[in-house]
Image (cartoon, rainbow, N blue to C red):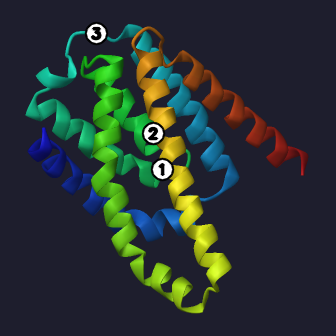
Amino acid sequence: MFWYIVVATLPGGIIGFILDKYAEELLTKPLIIAIALIIMGVILYLIDKNAKKQTDYKDMTFKQTFIIGLSQALAFIPGVSRSGITMTTGRALGVKREAVAKYSFMLSAPIVLAATVFKLKDFIEYFLVADMTGMIAFAMGVIMSFIVGMIVIKFLLDYLKKGSFKVFAIYRIIVGIVVIGIYFMR
């Protein structure tokens, strides 16, 4: 699985790196984000509802893992989450909910590491000008994020053994509608 993750990360990382500036400049409009939230919520719901639960984590093929990894490149569109698109793609390929969630979390590690390395210069600049209080606050934030992240991942994996992605699809649709409502009320 390690090599599957390495190979699956490459196309998404390359496409994301190339399109990052494009997305930052053109796709950050509230309506685009809201529409992406709604569309991906509907797609997640429909695919999850109709997917055949057949492939377990240990039985995922190279083709499945590669396509799931490639799909994360769509996360350059604001409102399309990386984990959401990878889980939706995995479900469309017949991977069990818990298995695709586990793979999606593992697939995020190289992306997060690459993003950290890419932004390392900003971290170093911050630490050169930060006082001790700022450094401690930053370190506490990283530690708490890690702890909360592990708790949430454990909860989600336990939930997905029996539950569906329906609640996440509904959440995305509601948030998208709220953003559209706020946008037009202004």
Looking at the picture, how far across and down is residue 163, in whole percent?
48, 11
Front tag of 2 and 3: 2
Residue 76 seen in this snapshot: yes
Q: Is residue 73 above or below residue 154?
A: below
Residue topped by disc 3:
53
Identity, as a three-letter code, of the amino acid under mark 1: Phe
Residues 133 and 125: in front is 133
Amino acid under label 2? Met
Quarter of the picture containing the N terminus is: top left
For label 1, count other residues whose C-alpha is less than 10 Å away and answer few (under 14), some (14-19) or many (20+): few
Q: CA distance from mark 2 to mark 1?
A: 6 Å
- Whether the residues at callouts 3 and 1 have beta carbons within 8 Å, the answer is no
Residue 138 horizontal/vertical position (percent): 58, 69
Q: From mark 3 to mark 1, how far is it between C-alphas? A: 30 Å
- Please report the residue visible at 60 percent of the width from the left and 72 percent of the height from the top: 136
What x and y, as percent, mark residue 42?
A: 53, 23
Q: Vertically, is 40 above or below 137?
A: above
Dot 3: what SS?
loop
Judged left or right of residue 47, residue 176 is right
- Residue visible at 44% across and 55% down in the picture: 76
Question: What residue sits 9% from the left and 46% below the top?
Answer: 3
How many numbered circles does the render carry?
Answer: 3
| Amino acid, disc 3 | Lys
- Asked if disc 2 and disc 1 are in contact, CB closer than 8 Å, the reply is yes
Q: Residue 82: x percent and y percent?
A: 42, 44
Task: Tell which circle, 2 or 3, labels the residue nearer the N-terminal end.
Answer: 3
Image disc number at residue 146: 1
- Looking at the image, can residue 80 be seen? no
Q: Earlier in the sequence, mark 3 or mark 1?
A: 3
Look at mark 2 in the image and give the residue it sits on: 150
Q: Nearer the viewer, mark 3 or mark 1?
A: 1
Q: Is residue 165 above or below residue 103?
A: above
